[in-house]
Image (tube, helix red, strand yellow):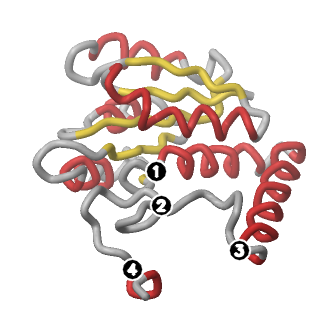
Amino acid sequence: MKVAVLMGSPRDRDKMAPAAEMLERLGLGADVRVLSAHRTPDEVADFARSARQEGFAAVICGAGLAAHLAGAVAAHTTLPVIGVPLSGGALGGVDALYATVQMPRGVPVATVAIDGAANAAILAAEMVAITDSDVSERLDQLRAEWGQTTAGGGAGVPAASEEGGVGAPPGAAKPPEAQS
């Protein structure tokens, strides 16, 4: 089973790399591509239309600013589409968050936190795990590892940013429970 990891620009590779890494950790193939809703709209539509036949289980789309990639993909497939709004620009990714989460009825896009590529991969794996017991077991193992390391002081748990936490945009305030 494989999951597509799309990004709107080659500059987004570092922010989307955690998705491919997490998918591989969970035993899922990651097909990483750069496709732009604005610069290569025909290629985006062609990819989305053929994704199911090509064996994809879900599509993860990362984009910043106007962030139309996830919506453009969702318009052309009934596979699950997970949007990752990416930080950048004057609004630090909030514009991308709104563009990704505010989809019209009938064209849903599941949306994770700004720069939340790893969580997008986990969500895709959870979707696959509905019918794949091997992936379900790997997810259980991952959560068990994180639970053990949390109890042991946090080593090995995904690091929260110094500002707002995992996936928080730069400059975001820490949640109240993290401020001490």
Label placed on residue 175? 4
Residue located beneath label 1 in the image: 116
**Secondary structure at numbered mark 2:** loop
Q: Which mark is residue 166?
A: 2
Counting from the top left corner in percent of width and height, residue 59 is at 52, 33
Residue 53 x, y percent position in the rendering: 63, 17
Q: Cα distance, mark 2 to mark 4?
A: 11 Å
Camera-nearest label, 1 or 3? 3
- The circle on residue 153 is 3
Point out the tag, 1 or 3, that comes first from the N-terminus.
Answer: 1
**Alpha carbon separation for disc pair 4 and 1:** 17 Å
Which numbered disc flags the more N-terminal residue, 2 or 4? 2
Q: Residue at x 67, y 37 (%)?
A: 23
Q: Amino acid at mark 2?
A: Val
Q: Earlier in the sequence, mark 3 or mark 4?
A: 3
Tags 3 and 4 in contact by the CB under 8 Å rule?
Answer: no
- The alpha-carbon separation of the residues under discs 3 and 2 comes to 17 Å
Q: Nearer the viewer, mark 1 or mark 2?
A: 2
Residue at (32% x, 24% y) in the render: 11
User: In the picture shown, does residue 117 fall above or below 32?
Assistant: below
